[in-house]
């Protein structure tokens, strides 16, 4: 299988090298651009780039301009990097169709985990996009859940949690394991956030679907038909 191409755009060569090294270890092919104009030229000349990691503050053409230009022609996933933790920047990014927004400084491991999650979500990684367990059906590509063939509206995190349960059905999963895999990083907050999400998920799945999520006392949960 061909390696997926990731375009890393940042005017700091040290930052590009840091991200590139982690992505290469993850078996990705990495292309680099040091400014916005170079990024746009590379994107349109390569054609098969799977995802872009894009810095906001750059010479010649900033990240917002690059994003606008690419979005006119492509829905390729884009992760924006910024040194400013500004809510207005984040809102602008999502309005432009940015998939993730990460503030510097960040952990390269978290960045790679987010890249992997987005590529799974956008059908670039893995072929198991249709999942089922009992009366529950999940279409990962369409981001759709059905219980007894009726559509169920889930939040993004509820959808990821249910998907992880189905992918590991019959296996007892600790709260820590769920946090690390569904939230994609080592979560140091209160593990009761899992209990809250499971409660909401059970409610939305209804009696028949919800009762399939079993509580493992003192540990976590298990999905079982």
Image: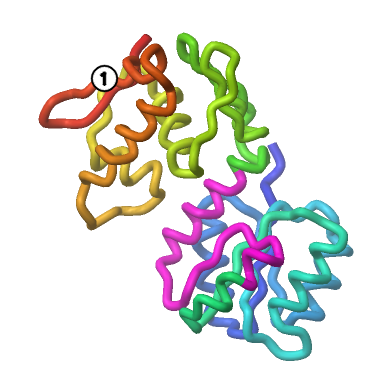
Residue 180, percent across and down?
Answer: 33, 46
Residue 165, percent across and down?
Answer: 39, 27
Image vertical order of residue 101 relative to residue 173, above or below: below
Quarter of the image with the C terminus in it: top left
Query: Circle 1 is placed at which residue position?
Result: 214
Label 1 secondary element: strand
Closest to the observer: 85 or 28?
85
Residues packed near mark 1 inside 10 Å, few (<14), some (14 to 19) or many (20 plus):
some
Residue 18 falls inside the magenta stretch: no
Closest to the observer: 219 or 3?
219
The reply, left or right, for residue 195 in relation to residue 24 is: left
Residue 103 falls inside the magenta stretch: yes
Image vertical order of residue 150 relative to residue 154, above or below: above
Quarter of the image with the N terminus in it: top right
Q: Determine the residue positioned at 25% across, 38% down.
A: 195
> How many discs mark residues in the rendered view?
1
The reply, left or right, for residue 146 in relation to residue 169 is: right
Q: Residue furthest bottom?
A: 59
Q: Residue furthest left?
A: 218
Closest to the observer: 64 or 118?
64
Q: Determine the residue positioned at 71% across, 42% down.
A: 2
- The magenta stretch is 92-119
Q: Which quadrant holds residue 58?
A: bottom right
Residue 34, percent across and down?
Answer: 70, 81
What colour scheme governs how the chains and residues are painted in the rendered image of this protein?
Answer: rainbow
Q: Determine the residue positioned at 41% across, 49% down.
A: 184
Image vertical order of residue 224 relative to residue 89, above or below: above
Residue 135, percent across and down?
Answer: 49, 11
Q: Determine the residue positioned at 35% across, 26% down.
A: 202
The reply, left or right, for residue 183 in relation to residue 120 is: left
Q: Which quadrant holds residue 126?
A: top right
């Amino acid at each position: 299988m061909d390696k997926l191409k990731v375009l890393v755009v940042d005017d700091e060569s040290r930052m590009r090298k840091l991200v590139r090294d982690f992505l290469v270890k993850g078996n990705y092919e990495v292309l680099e651009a040091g400014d916005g104009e170079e990024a746009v030229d590379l994107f349109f000349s390569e054609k098969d780039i799977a995802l872009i990691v894009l810095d906001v503050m750059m010479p010649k053409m900033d990240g917002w301009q690059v994003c606008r230009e690419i979005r006119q022609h492509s829905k390729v996933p884009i992760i924006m990097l910024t040194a400013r933790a500004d809510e207005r920047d984040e809102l602008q990014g999502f309005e432009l169709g940015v998939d993730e927004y990460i503030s510097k400084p960040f952990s390269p491991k978290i960045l790679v985990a987010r890249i992997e999650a987005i590529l799974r979500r956008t059908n670039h990684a893995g072929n198991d996009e249709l999942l089922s367990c009992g009366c529950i059906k999940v279409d990962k590509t369409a981001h759709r859940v059905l219980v007894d063939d009726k559509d169920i509206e889930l939040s993004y995190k509820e959808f990821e949690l249910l998907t992880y349960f189905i992918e590991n059905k019959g296996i007892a999963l600790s709260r820590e394991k769920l946090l690390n895999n569904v939230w994609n990083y080592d979560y140091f907050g209160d593990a009761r956030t899992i209990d809250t999400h499971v409660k909401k998920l059970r409610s939305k799945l209804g009696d028949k679907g919800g009762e399939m999520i079993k509580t493992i006392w003192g540990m976590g949960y298990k999905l079982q038909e």
